[in-house]
């Protein structure tokens, strides 16, 4: 019994410690860091890949290298919303013209999708440490991903002078996470139970006694 109580106390303290280390939206925006995640790639791990993320307040640089290297440079405090991408030694600028929620055909949306997938598949999955702790590699990737999702996906512009920053709201209202109700076909609808409409003759007490 004593060991059980002690285990509960340890779990409670660990939970409180993790919550205390959870970074806020403001801390994420103001942070400066650089993190690198190396992974074994294709061909039995012979072809390795490397994801590097560098952040200096508003400026975020994401570099992915397998055979060739691609670099995304995004200033989340700058209008118009855009990203600079360097591939094969040349740089191109992709400007956000509309939301990518329902239509991913534009060049901007295609490039944002590529960046998002790289950060998830090679960063969030493999980075070490707790996601909520910005001192860990996992926390730094997660912080960068949230900022870029708000800026590139939701079209939210950040500022160094804004003290009411919120980066978690976009996740709560993410339409991709909503469960759509199944449509019921006409033949699948339940048939209502039929009620008996026959009239019931009520026999009075005096009539019963007359039998």
Image (tube, rainbow, N blue to C red):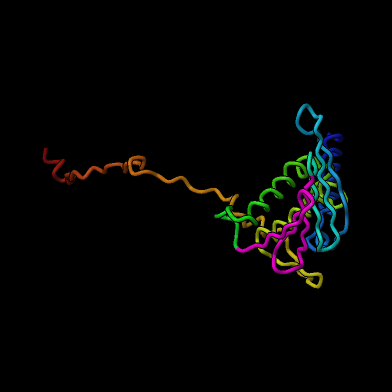
Where is residue 55 drawn, in percent x and y? 84, 57
Does residue 80 belong to the magenta stretch? yes
Most extreme residue toward the bottom, as rendered?
Answer: 161
| Residue 147 can be seen in this image | no
Q: Residue at x 86, y 42 (%)?
A: 10
| Residue 65 can be seen in this image | yes
Camera-side residue of 36 and 169 = 36
Where is residue 121 drawn, in percent x and y? 73, 41
Q: Residue at x 82, y 42 (%)?
A: 50
Q: Main secondary structure of the magenta part?
A: strand
- In this figure, what is the number of numbered marks? 0
Q: Residue at x 43, y 46 (%)?
A: 183
Does residue 119 belong to the magenta stretch? no
Where is residue 87 drawn, in percent x and y? 76, 50
Stretch of the chain drawn in magenta: 69-97
Quarter occupied by the N terminus? top right
């Amino acid at each position: 019994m004593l060991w059980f109580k002690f285990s509960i106390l340890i779990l409670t303290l660990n939970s409180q410690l993790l919550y205390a280390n959870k970074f806020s939206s403001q801390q994420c925006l103001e942070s400066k860091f650089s993190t690198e995640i190396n992974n074994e790639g294709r061909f039995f791990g012979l072809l390795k890949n490397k994801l590097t993320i560098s952040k200096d307040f508003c400026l975020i640089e994401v570099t992915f290298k397998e055979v060739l290297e691609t670099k995304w440079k995004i200033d989340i405090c700058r209008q118009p919303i855009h990203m600079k991408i360097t591939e094969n030694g040349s740089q191109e600028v992709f400007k956000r013209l509309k939301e990518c929620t329902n239509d991913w055909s534009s060049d901007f949306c295609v490039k944002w999708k590529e960046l998002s997938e790289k950060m998830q598949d090679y960063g969030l999955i493999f980075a070490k440490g707790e996601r909520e702790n910005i001192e860990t590699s996992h926390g730094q990737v997660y912080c960068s991903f949230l900022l870029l999702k708000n800026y590139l996906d939701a079209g939210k512009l950040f500022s160094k002078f804004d003290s009411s920053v919120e980066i978690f709201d976009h996740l709560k209202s993410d339409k991709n996470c909503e469960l759509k109700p199944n449509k019921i076909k006409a033949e699948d609808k339940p048939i209502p139970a039929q009620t008996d409409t026959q009239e019931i003759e009520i026999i009075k007490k005096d009539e019963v006694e007359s039998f």
